[in-house]
Amino acid sequence: MASSILSLASASLSSLENKQGKLNLGSNCLSFDRDKNIPFAKTKSLSRISMVASVNVSRFEGITMAPPDPILGVSEAFKADTHGNKLNLGVGAYRTEELQPYVLDVVKKVEKHMLERGDNKEYLPIEGLAAFNKATAELLFGADNPVIKQQRVATIQGLSGTGSLRVAAALIERYFPGAKVLISSPTWGNHKNIFDDARVPWSEYRYYDPKTVGLDFEGMMSDIKAAPEGSFVLLHGCAHNPTGIDPTPEQWEKIADVIQEKNHIPFFDVAYQGFASGSLDADAASVRLFAARGLELLVAQSYSKNLGLYAERIGAINIVCSSADAATRVKSQLKRIARPMYSNPPVHGAKIVANIVGDPALFNEWKAEMEMMAGRIKDVRQKLYDSLCAKDRSGKDWSFILEQIGMFSFTGLSKVQSDNMTDKWHVYMTKDGRISLAGLSLAKCEYLADAIIDSFHNVR
C-alpha cells in the first residue's frame, strides 16, 4: 500500500517537473511515518506553486450515483424556477385555493388535546397502537362486517402506505415463494420498487387505454385470466394512481369473478379512502365487495391524503383470513417481519387517527373536512374541463377529465408534450402525463388549459 502511494506521488511530481522545469524539492515533499507505516505529505511553496501529494481512495468507490426520483425530483425543479406562473402538479399533496399546504382543523384540535394531556412518547408494541389498529380496520371494512366480528383480520400499524406494502411484500416473498404480483399498467411509481426490493416477481396487466383515455377493461380481464393460478393481483381501491380511472361497480363484480375463478389473491392499495369521493364508505366499496365474497385478501392503508398526515407516516396492513386462528398466526409473522425492519412504528399519527375515529364529534368534523377537500378538487376538475372546452376549437373531447376521480388526472400527454408543459409553460408534472389537481387552483385553470392545448396540438 505504501509503495503504491509513493509511486502515485512520484508520478505526480514527475509530471509537474516536466511542466514547470526541473524542481529540487529536497526532503520536504514526502515523509514516512515509521510507527504507522503510512506515508504523509509535506508542502513547500516554490514560485507560487503549492503541492500536496496525497491519495484518498474510498471503500465505496464502486457505488454509482442513483437516478433522481421521478416524482420527488419534480418538486426540486419547481423550487428552482422563478417564473411567476409556475405550477407544481407533480407531487400528490393537497393544497388550498392559495396553493398552500393544509393542516386539517380537526388534526390541530386533537394535537392540542394530546399536548394538554401530556401524552408520552414511549415505544409502541411491534404491531402498533391497539386503538389505531381497531379503528383503521373498522373504518376500512365497517364495524359490523363479519370479518371484524369473527376476528378474521390481521392488522398491524405500518409506515404509511409504502411501509405497509413493503411488509406485505416481505410476507409474500417468505410464505409464497415464486408467486407473482400483477400490477396495473400504469401504476404508482413506487409499486415496482417495493416488490423489486422484496425480491417478489411481478408482471403488468393492461389498465389504461390511450385511445379512449379510459379503462382497458377487456385487456385487464384477459391479463388477469392469463396469469398463473394463485397470483396476487394488486388493485387500487379507489382513485387509481396515476390515471384517476376506476372500474364501475359492475366491472368490480366481474373483476372479483375472474380473481375468484383463478384462485388469485386480491391485494388492495387504499391510499385515498374518503378523499376520492368525499365518502369513506363509497371509497371502501371495492374492498368490502371482495370481503363479502369470502375471499382472503390483503389491504394496505394510508392516512397521508385523507387526514393530511403526510409526514407522520401512518398507515396499516390488513390481511383478511378464512379463520380467526389463521389471522392470529399471520399477525405473528407480520410482527416478525416488522421487528428487524423498523422495530416498531411511530406513535404520534396513530394517536391522531385513533382519537378522531374514536370520538363521534371529531369523526364528523373530519368527514366534513374530507368532503370540503374532495369538493375543492371536483370544482377544479370541472373548471379545467370548462376552460379546455372553451379555448380548444379543434373539437377534441375532453370529457375524460370529468370521468376520472380523485386528486390526479391522466392528461394523455406524451413525454415530449409533458416536457413542453414544463419548458415553455413552467408546469411541473410527471413525464407520463399525470397532473395533480390537488395542486391546482381555480384561478390557474385557464393558464393550465392554455398549456395543455398548446402541448397537445403543437408538440409531436
Image: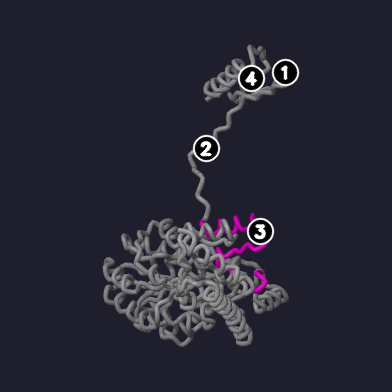
Question: Which numbered disc, 2 or 3, marks the residue closer to the eye?
Answer: 3
Q: Are marks 1 and 2 in contact (CB under 8 Å)?
A: no
Residue corresponding to mark 4: 30
Q: Is label 3 in contact with label 4 (beta carbons under 8 Å)?
A: no
What residue does disc 3 label?
Answer: 83
Q: Secondary structure at mark 2?
A: loop
Who comes first in sequence, dot 2 or dot 3? 2
Q: Are marks 2 and 3 in contact (CB under 8 Å)?
A: no
Q: Magenta part mainly helix, strand or loop?
A: loop
State the separation of the CA atoms marked 1 and 2.
Answer: 36 Å
- Relative horizontal placement of residue 25, taking residue 437 as reference (left or right): right
**Residue behind mark 1:** 47
Alpha carbon distance from label 3 to label 4: 54 Å
Per the rendered image, the range of residues in magenta is 70-99
Residue 266 in view (yes/no): yes
User: Horizontal and vertical percent for residue 284?
Assistant: 46, 80
Q: Position of residue 186 (x, y in %)?
A: 41, 65
Considering only order in the chain, which callout, 2 or 1, is on the residue closer to the N terminus? 1
Q: How many marks?
A: 4
Q: In the image, what residue occupies the spot 61% across and 17% down?
A: 19
Mark in the foreground, 4 or 1: 1
